[in-house]
Amino acid sequence: MQVTESLNEGLKRELQITVPKGDLNTKLDEKLEQLKGQVRINGFRPGKVPTAHLKKLYGKSAMSEIVQELITSESQTAIEARKERPAYQPEINLSNEDKDVDGILAGTADLQFDVVFEIVPKFDIPDFKKIKVTKLVSEVAEDEIDKSIADLAKSYQDFEPKKKGSKAKNGDKVEISFKGTMDGKEFEGGSAENVPLEIGAEQFIPGFEEQIIGAKVGDDVEVKVTFPKDYSAVPLQGKDAEFAVKVLEISKAIESKIDDDFAKKLGLEDLAQLRERIKEQLTGELDQASRQKVKRALLDELEVMVSFDLPEKLLTQEFDAIFAQVKEEMERAGKSFEDEDTTEEEATADYKKIAERRVRLGLLLAEVGEDKEITVPDEDVNQALIAQVRQYPGQEEQIIDYYKKNPQAVAQIRAPLFEERVVDYILELAEVSEKTVTREELLKADDEDEQEDVHVHGPDCDHDHDH
């Protein structure tokens, strides 16, 4: 094998690898010798088929396998000899002209192919002990538990029919039948019979429920609405419609008594146990929010501590993935960049910065994980896999089979677990102070939270593939 470096510019590398035809034919002879004892050909005893005859029958297919094996093994050997780490799976291009391909398979031409890749940039891991971050924390208050239980009780409310002649009001449950028309014509999905509707629960499109208020059982109500611009059924988005509604029944809510009996209805021992379960749930939400906030603060600090060139292909892939998702969401919502008070050019520049942040932080965390030999136990991966499978009830076997056949899919489950372990390692070294805030402050949405997603793949997460 002969290796020639044809490009060494920044992080870009290109190697031309040549395997002489003599080596190809030696490999072919070895493979044909193995075939002798395996194939059964009429007219020949087992193991006595002449090599020339085998070559005539299987030469091209055997040589094709050899070429594939050599491309994989020789490119890997060449890269390892250079002690460089590709930032992604190298691209392989056959150098030979089309007319030479038959020559390669026939063993009369050398095999030449190019290996194109970018390397993981070299950089110094910063001193994490110099990092100072504030962890926002909050405790669950008793009134928050009260409110959660009250909301829970409302969702389990019972209803009883109202007196004859009573009018529907906010909070009542009505049973209706309706027929929708658009420009005088019925449209698909616009009609239904005996539909339960809780007024004020915002189950129907905006403006529909309010127009039922004041109606009595037996009334016919004409409801006029405009479908939202982001309505799930695209043909109806932004369109005006009229519904002929028949009120069949009106029921009022019966206030649920919050006591031990209510808790038992939920499968718990008593009200005290219900309060404890609600507190655990709320505490979990706060802990998760606290974790996300301190992680974001840590990544902000890390971003200003490192600076190095980034592989162009990783940047392009990251940006393309982000922007495709943005456009898909905007299309689904029926919005444009102008609606978001920006232009496509400005949005492109903004999301390119996000892509750069993700790639840079991803490479940094991956390097820390490899340097400190951080791994993810199989038990953790299995638990995450089980959680993933549970999202598809009735399809468990197919989902498990998919992951068994796709190691890359398993790597995608392992990757965020690896990332969290690396973050934990850094936080242990950093100076972390706590600040108590209200629940509202802690749960306040951050428009830039999406930047936390750095898509780390470490050595434990198939690092040589797309990060």
Image (tube, rainbow, N blue to C red):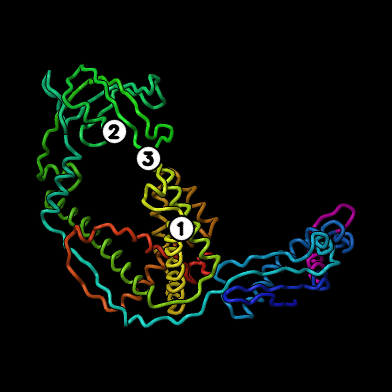
Q: Is residue 232 left or right of residue 2?
A: left
Label number found at residue 204: 2
> Quick check: can you spot residue 86?
yes
For the question of whether residue 36 can be seen, the reply is no
Q: What secondary structure is found at the residue carrying circle 1? A: helix
Q: Secondary structure at mark 2?
A: loop
**Which residue was labeled with disc 3?**
230
Of badges 2 and 3, the one in the foreground is: 3
Which element type, helix, strand or loop, lies under badge 3?
A: loop
Distance from label 2 to label 3 (Cα)? 14 Å
Inspect the magenta stretch and tell me whether residue 39 lies in it: yes
Q: Is residue 108 left or right of residue 83?
A: right
Local packing at callout 1 (Cα closer than 10 Å; few below 14, some 14-19, many 20+) is some
- Distance of label 2 from label 1 (alpha carbons): 36 Å
Q: Earlier in the sequence, mark 2 or mark 1?
A: 2
Residue 41 x, y percent position in the rendering: 85, 54
Q: Amino acid at mark 1?
A: Thr
Residue 132 in the image: x percent, y percent? 28, 77
Q: Looking at the rendering, which quadrant does residue 239 occupy?
A: top left
Is 419 above or below relative to 281? below
Residue 211 magenta? no
Alpha carbon separation for disc pair 1 and 3 = 23 Å
Front one among 54 and 412? 412
Q: Going 90% across and 53% down the picture, which residue do you hit?
A: 43
Q: Which mark is residue 348?
A: 1
Looking at the rendering, the stretch of residues picked out in magenta corresponds to 26-45
